[in-house]
Amino acid sequence: MKRYFFFLLSSLFIGRAAAQVGAPYIHDPSTIAECEGKYYTFGTGGGGIISEDGWSWHSGAERPGGGAAPDVMKIGDRYLFIYGATGGGLGGGHNGRILTMWNRSLDPKSPDFKFTTAIEVAASDGLEDCDAIDPCLLLDPTTGRLWASFGTYFGNIRLIELDPMTGERVRGNQEKDIAIDCEATDLIYRDGWYYLLGTHGTCCDGVNSTYNIVVGRSRSVEGPYVDNVGRDMLNGGGRMVIAAGDRVCGPGHFGRTIIDEGVEIMSCHYEADFDQGGRSVLGLRPLLWKNGWPVAGERFHGGTFAILSERRGYSLEMAVDFVRIQHERQGWWRTNPDEPVKPVADQQLTDVIGTWPQGDIKVRCSDYMMRPHQQWTITPVPEAGGFLGGPYCKIVIRGTDRALAATADLELTAVPAFTGAPEQLWRIEQLTDGCYRLLPKGIPGREGINTRYVLYSAADSTPTLAEWDFSTDNAKWNLKGL
């Protein structure tokens, strides 16, 4: 963070279904942490925001010490915080300090909520080629060693090692330069690779901020971190992960959250949301992995789609009679090239709806033939709540109120009208491979929110609900926009 930029939180509701709702206003957010069923992220200035479901956010998270750009990680039964106390041009200088502290809870109302005294783990004197600010944490899953990176455009990005039991600097550890030309870094590990994600560009200028997030990778946590064309991040390399678009700009401060096998999201802040008056807001996007590189997926806005099984490519459809399109046919052997071409009109809903049963209709899969019974309109229903990354949606046959619903015996049906019942609300998540998984919010006769059963192709033409399994294409679907 190049200079201090603090946003007061308010309770203004965000109207766009694709954006986080409530009061998601934050700058320099930490990686999202979960505590007792709630989600927390902490930002510059000492505060943070909380969500009960991952979709609607409000103020209330607390962190002492002020400063900028914290990160948080759960280690054992405690949460380790790291943050920059000064630096980044705050107060006009680059003499920064990196501090760590612990807490057993993130809930300010918990009896276990008590921060330990902050301790210094790194510093910069304002003259050297580094600025001790914008830290992040990585607990190496292969070794159990704890690492932190920090730094800004003022100099190099540096790596240090911490003790995962105390949060103190490992005795004798020497700082190592690993990147330049970025700030607000994050370290993650996946499939034998260490990834260094850095925020490039300018911040704190609202809709004119040019922040974007780039990445390099290494087989060693100590680098060198190299991008997709072989450029070392110490020489300014970096492959794009996310840039401006979709009426938001300035993404910075990457964080990764693994929801399930094959289901990941990335968090960041957008320097400016055009639809929110240019405020800095929390951003959540699907995290995809393409050829071993992380890339942000798109925010899901809804639309009309063919829902196609990854298993075979068949289309989800209502089990109604196939109605043929009547048209004048001409054999290929007697085609007159000089005769005007007459386009064949698409089959319309009015052409077939009278042939459909009035009550519930079973659902199946078959060849996609551009027919009304295969065209589904998916619409976010923000008032029905959401999950980490998006709102629940309704799925109806295009031009009707006939809704896709789960049944008590883990099957699917298309009911005559959408009522907002939990079995008619769908959680739609883009997977790390770009496909989607679809889960009903609730299943009749079962308590609680469903996080286990997904839309599943039990055979080429037989959709059902089954337990999530990322390793099989049966559980994956593609949304083909119409």
Image (cartoon, grey):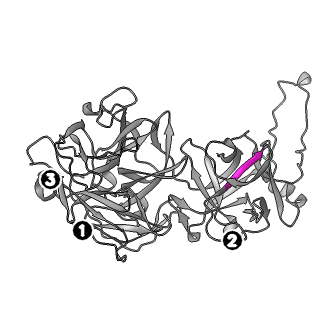
Distance, label 2 to label 3, CA atoms, is: 53 Å
Look at mark 2 in the image and give the residue it sits on.
421
In the rendered image, residue 455 lying in the magenta stretch gets the answer yes
Please indicate whether residue 413 sits to the left or right of residue 210 in the image: right
Query: Measured from the top left, where is residue 210 in percent x and y?
Result: 32, 47
Q: Name the amino acid type tagged 3.
A: Gly
Report which residue position mark 3 lands on: 96
> Range of the magenta residues?
454-459
**Disc assigned to residue 64:** 1
Which mark is in front, 2 or 3?
Answer: 3
Where's residue 49, x and y in %? Answer: 37, 67
**Mark 1 vs 2: CB contact within 8 A:** no
Q: Which mark is residue 156?
A: none
User: From the viewer's perspective, is residue 381 above or below residue 363?
Assistant: below
Mark 3 surroundings within 10 Å by alpha-carbon count, few (fewer than 14), some (14 through 19), many (20 or more) = many
Given the image, on which type of amino acid does mark 1 rest?
A: Pro
Q: Which residue is drawn at 19% across and 42% down?
A: 173
Q: Which of marks 1 and 2 is in front?
A: 1
